[in-house]
Image: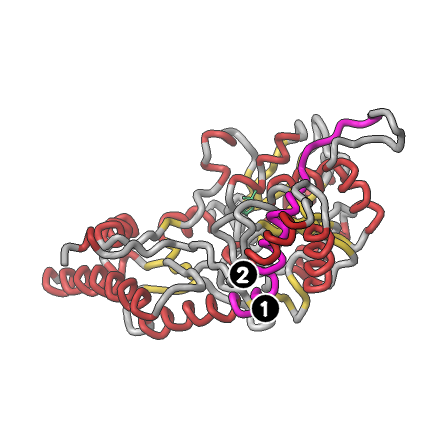
Amino acid sequence: MPTNEMKRIYLSPPHMSGREQGYINEAFETNWIAPLGPNIDAFEKQLAAYTGSADAVAVSSGTAAIHLSLQLLGVGVGDTVLCPSFTFVATANPIRYCGAEPIFIDSEPETWNMSPSALKRALEDADRGGTLPKAVIVVHLYGQVSKMDELAALCEQYEVPLIEDAAESLGSTYRGKQSGTFGKFGIYSFNGNKIITTSGGGMLVSDDVELLHKARFLATQARDAAAHYQHSSMGFNYRMSNILAGVGRAQLEVLDERVAARRAVYENYEQALSAVQGISFMPELHYTRSNRWLTTLVIDQSVTNTTITELLECMAAANIEARPLWKPLHLQPLFAGTKFYSHAGNIAVCEQLFETGICLPSGSSMTSIDQVRVVDCVKDVLTKATGKSIQSA
Ligand SMILES: *Cc1c(COP(=O)(O)O)cnc(C)c1O
């Protein structure tokens, strides 16, 4: 069979539990077709309980949740916010929505997430200049939780509020505590490709219930307590639909199963590819448990004698959706000229990761036959290339 007729294997497709329709029907039967209603109340309560947060606010996207958290911290024109360079653009765009500027922090090799030593230098410089950032946003990429002890201690030392972009890490833990619950605010995303989905949506969590009360106010156009429509502050239309919250309720019920399934996909890949020279998977600190949202790996090109471009081309030819790792934000035209703090000296860890890493299809509904197809493809490219190098040596 020609490869292009083979069923496409997606990177991270939605995986419904089968109970979503029931909650959607309930919304229709009770006519709660609005950005408020019983599904929203229940979804918020259940997510807060799952993560161990005091409360949660369901919003239209993870990006909206980040924007709200920055608004609540008073981020405005002329301010700076520190965030990792190695992340999706949605982490940094809301900083600009507020009229503020991001300063990018490099990754460190043990988690691929924000480097505490680079953060330390950035905070020292800012302190010396008398311009401490308004917030630090930490991201837990591909499900791996950042070095929270070190990062939180630095934020505390300089009294800068910490926001966790846990869009990719719902269900991941650090010393047994859920990612997203270490900072002033945590945010999750339910976009179609995330570990659980509402097709689109997000959640803002915090232990500060008063601030979350204010978040609900800001997310519903900031209407003052008056029968007529009166407004003293600028608001947004950021609430989640009660229909989509129904999808979220059913998805949350199976989150633990989804984490287990993604971890199993990772373990299969790791086992099957462990014999291939020059591959290393994204590490996991022994006191953390990643949800393994995506299985990611880097190749040592001097050993494999091939590039990720060749690897990705082969995957594409086999109708397998694989992707490079996130392109660092300090290299994006959008953020040209923005300050960047490297992990150590002139070596940018995030640039090296970007140049040598890929994400493998990791959906929780992936069959073992699909996984074998991916493994065979990787093996094929890398062993052929290694063979080539042996012959020419
Ligand atoms: C998906 C994602 C977001 C944005 O979430 P949306 O719900 O798509 O707005 C933010 N940060 C990271 C790291 C993400 O992966």
Q: Is residue 118 left or right of residue 393?
A: right
Residue on which disc 2 sits: 144
Q: Is residue 206 left or right of residue 188?
A: right
Q: Amino acid at mark 1?
A: Thr
Residue 116 screen position, x and y as percent: 62, 54
Q: Give above or below for 68 relative to 354.
A: above
Within the magenta stretch, is there residue 393?
A: no
- The structure's colour scheme is secondary structure
- The answer to which quarter of the image holds residue 256 is bottom right
Q: How many marks?
A: 2
Q: Classify residue 357 by image quadrant.
A: bottom left
Q: Residue furthest front?
A: 29
Tell me if residue 92 can be seen: yes
Closer to us: 354 or 97: 97
Check the image and report above or below for 257 versus 249. Answer: below
Q: Is the residue indicated by label 2 positioned so its CB lies within 8 Å of ligand 1?
A: no
- Answer with the quarter of the image where residue 43 lies: bottom right
| Viewer-proximal residue among 29 and 83 | 29
Q: Secondary structure at mark 2?
A: loop
Q: Are marks 2 and 1 in contact (CB under 8 Å)?
A: yes
Q: Amino acid at mark 2?
A: Gln
Q: In the image as oriented, which residue stretches furthest toward the right?
A: 226
Please, what secondary structure does the residue beneath circle 1 have?
Answer: strand
314 and 387: which is toward the camera: 314
Across and down, in percent, residue 78 comes to 70, 27
**Which quadrant of the rendered structure holds the N terminus?**
bottom left
Q: Residue at x 71, y 57 (%)?
A: 42
Magenta residues, start to end? 230-258
User: Residue under circle 1?
Assistant: 288
Magenta-drawn stretch contains 248: yes
Does residue 65 appear anywhere in the picture?
no
The residue sitting at 86% across, 25% down in the picture is: 228
